[in-house]
Amino acid sequence: MIRVLLADDEPLALRGLSLRLAEYSDVEIVAKAANGTTACEAINLHQPDAVFLDVDMPGLKGTEVARMLHQSGQPEVIFISAYPEYAIEAFEVSALDYLVKPVSCIRLKETISRLRERLNTDNKTPQYLTIKDSGCIDKVHFNSIDYINAAGDYMVIHAGSKTYVHRSTMTRLLDALGDDHFIRIHRSTVIAISRLQSYEAGSHGDGYVILNNGQRLRCSRSYKRDIESLL
């Protein structure tokens, strides 16, 4: 299931997009927002897989919201606007697509297909980890994870401002996550490839990986070549 959030200050446009998306059985609208500020709040609360953002909204503009999301690496962004001239600015923040109002059924179908491919929802592997802690159950979406480090028999999962403790081995956890989107930088540390920003060489063959949120993590010599190949 693809969880999406819609943000548009025009009620009719919001309703029209909702009706079109209702035709897709694998798309769930988890929240709607009428401006950029409430969109940010709803994104933090619901952690959607993708957001449909109107470019020109009161308060924070859609492009401003997207820049904030781009820094954290998630979710996927699809812009919607009546003005095609904003497209260049939209793709500068790595938008998945840019839809011009009124949104046609054909273009929306293309966007959903592209979104499915990006999120790889056609395979049968769950796109989230189920974590049990103190009687509570959390579902942590893969695309929200920044990095993971080991602490004995537990894995500490860092996802934005949240931290989860999960009883597992690193090998078992990597098998669940898949190596297409995550990479080991140390025997006790794994990072999301999408969060990788740069690498700093050390003095003894090792170094440090810098994530796009500014986090600096040690990279051992045996994984240095794998990281350098991604940059």
Image (tube, rainbow, N blue to C red):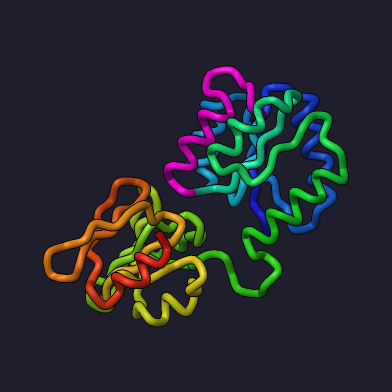
Q: Position of residue 230 (x, y in %)?
A: 42, 63
Residue at the image point whose x is 66% and y is 36% from the top: 79
In the displayed structure, 199 sits above or below 72; it is below
Q: Position of residue 209 (x, y in %)?
A: 28, 59
Direction from residue 111 to residue 104 in the image, left or right? right
- Could you tell me how many numbered marks the image carries? 0
Direction from residue 212 to residue 49 in the image, left or right? right
Q: Is residue 134 visible?
A: no
* Magenta span includes 70: yes
In the displayed structure, 172 sits above or below 210; it is below
Q: Which residue is the extreme one toward the right?
A: 105
Residue at the image point whose x is 50% and y is 62% from the top: 142
* Magenta span includes 24: no
Direction from residue 163 to residue 3 in the image, left or right? right
Residue at the image point whose x is 39% and y is 49% from the top: 160
Please report the bounds of the magenta region as a residue range. 54-73
Q: In which image quadrant can residue 225 be found? A: bottom left
Direction from residue 187 to residue 172 in the image, left or right? right
Quadrant including the N terminus:
bottom right
Quadrant including the C terminus:
bottom left
**74, 135: nearer the viewer:** 74
**108, 25: nearer the viewer:** 108
Q: Which residue is the extreme one toward the left?
A: 203
Q: Position of residue 125 (x, y in %)?
A: 61, 73
Q: Position of residue 113 (x, y in %)?
A: 76, 56
Residue at the image point whose x is 35% and y is 65% from the top: 228
Q: Is residue 192 visible?
A: yes
**180, 154: nearer the viewer:** 180
In the displayed structure, 192 sits above or below 106; it is below
